[in-house]
Amino acid sequence: MRCEAVEVYFEDAIQGPQRRQMDTDIGDFVIYRKDHLPAYQLATAYDDVAQNISHVVRGCDLIDSTPRQIYLQKLLGKTSPQYAHLPVLAKADGQKLSKQNLAAPLNPDTSNSNLLKALTLLNQAPPKSLVGASCADIIDWAISNWQLNRVPRTSAIRKTQPDF
């Protein structure tokens, strides 16, 4: 996809205002793969509007994809959803914790503890009374008490201890 000299602006609900100049900041990008299937950017942009997605919440590692998707949605004459990019969990060196980066897997036997740690890292302040609670109870609490304005306005939360 050849990009024109246009600016894409969006207000990220967590990271704040984002501006990208398509021709210089982003540049041309692939919308069809060699096997003639839609590439990620086109597939995502189209799926979001085709399914009437109103809000997209995802990791901040994908924030640079957002201008491409908004650009494609505008070319399709469609309205873009609202976006919120959460900080990702990273090692002390800044590398995202992921299977791709060989991070240790989460222990499924401590899923309730994992949820509480994640909520704490996102500044949601779960009460001590949730320690030992079921995952369903923790998720119910998170839904009822979620405060987007408390989420750290950063691309990554760096962990110095390997406990998560």
Image (cartoon, rainbow, N blue to C red):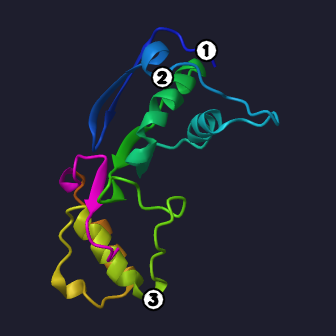
Quadrant position of residue 75: top right
Question: Label 3 near label 1: C-beta < 8 Å?
Answer: no
- Residue at the spot x=55%, y=14% of the render? 3
**SS for tag 2?**
helix
Identity, as a three-letter code, of the amino acid under mark 2: Ile
The answer to which of 10 and 120 lies nearer the viewer is 120
**SS for tag 1?**
loop
Circle on res. 26: 2
- Residue at the spot x=55%, y=41% of the render? 52
Q: Does the magenta portion include 155?
A: yes
Identity, as a three-letter code, of the amino acid under mark 1: Arg
- Left/right placement of residue 82 relative to residue 70 reads left
Q: Can you name the residue that lies furthest to the right here? A: 35
List x then y, in percent, for residue 159: 28, 64
Marks 1 and 2 sit apart, C-alpha to C-alpha, by 10 Å
Pointer 3 residue: 109
Pointer 1 residue: 2
- Left/right placement of residue 30 relative to residue 62 reads right
Estimate how packed mark 1 is, as few (under 14), some (14 to 19) or many (20 or more) residues with alpha carbons within 10 Å: few
107 vs 17: above or below:
below
- Residue at the spot x=52%, y=19% of the render? 27
4 vs 106: above or below:
above
Q: What stretch is highlighted in magenta?
A: 149-164
Marks 1 and 3 sit apart, C-alpha to C-alpha, by 48 Å
Estimate how packed mark 3 is, as few (under 14), some (14 to 19) or many (20 or more) residues with alpha carbons within 10 Å: few
Q: Does the magenta portion include 146?
A: no
Question: Label 2 near label 1: C-beta < 8 Å?
Answer: no
List x then y, in percent, for residue 106: 45, 76
Marks 2 and 3 sit apart, C-alpha to C-alpha, by 42 Å
Badge 1 or badge 2: first in the primary sequence: 1
**SS for tag 3?**
helix
Identity, as a three-letter code, of the amino acid under mark 3: Asp
